[in-house]
């Protein structure tokens, strides 16, 4: 079955950096677009970034453009999110997502807290 496992979250000061990872299994990883979403306290879940199967098409939310970078390693079946210049508003649980056979699959998320 499809499994997505996020890691790399933690507490970081404003202006700092973190790199999130999402390890995937149970499906043909290099056949699917992968996405990152996040849900901040008291907020709805929102799109952060997406990457096409071989990385040729990448999209970002306006709020993270120029600060976050999504990438993937198909050999390792892993998608990454490099987050730089972090702000308190980036505090959220970050989720990995794949849409497969019209079903959205989600990991359990990894918490990122940006605070001094």
Image: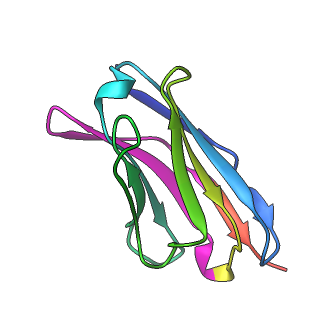
Q: State the quadrant of the N terminus.
A: top left
Residue at image position (30%, 34%) is 32
Residue 27 or residue 69, whichever sits in front: 69
Colour scheme shown: rainbow
Q: Is residue 78 magenta?
A: no
Name the spot of residue 33 as percent of width and height, x first: 32, 41
Q: Is residue 104 magenta?
A: yes
Q: State the quadrant of the C terminus.
A: bottom right
Name the spot of residue 44 as percent of width and height, x first: 38, 72
User: Quarter of the image holding residue 16?
Assistant: bottom right
Name the spot of residue 25 as percent of width and height, x first: 44, 21
Range of residues picked out in magenta: 89-110
User: Quarter of the image holding residue 89?
Assistant: bottom right
Residue at image position (51%, 38%) is 72
Q: Is residue 54 above or below residue 65?
A: above
Q: Is 46 on the left-hand or right-hand side of 73?
A: left
Q: Is residue 112 above or below residue 24?
A: below
Q: Is 115 on the left-hand or right-hand side of 106?
A: right
Q: Is residue 80 above or below residue 12?
A: above
Q: Is 30 on the left-hand or right-hand side of 94?
A: left
Residue at image position (44%, 77%) is 43
Name the spot of residue 42 as percent of width and height, x first: 48, 78
Q: How many marks?
A: 0
Residue 93 or residue 20, whichever sits in front: 20
Q: Specify the farthest residue to the left.
A: 102
Q: Specify the farthest residue to the front.
A: 56
Q: Tell me which secondary structure the magenta stretch mostly adopts.
A: strand
Residue at image position (34%, 43%) is 52
User: Quarter of the image holding residue 93?
Assistant: bottom right
């Amino acid at each position: 079955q499809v499994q997505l496992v996020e890691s790399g979250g933690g507490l970081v000061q404003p202006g700092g950096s973190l790199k999130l990872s999402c390890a995937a299994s149970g499906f043909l990883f290099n056949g699917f677009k992968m996405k990152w979403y996040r849900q901040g306290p008291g907020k709805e879940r929102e799109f952060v970034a997406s990457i096409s199967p071989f990385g040729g098409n990448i999209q970002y939310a306006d709020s993270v453009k120029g600060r976050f970078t999504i990438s993937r390693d198909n050999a390792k079946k892993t998608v990454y999110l490099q987050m730089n210049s972090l702000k308190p508003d980036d505090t959220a649980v970050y989720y990995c997502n794949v849409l497969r056979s019209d079903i959205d699959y989600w990991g359990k998320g990894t918490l990122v807290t940006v605070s001094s």
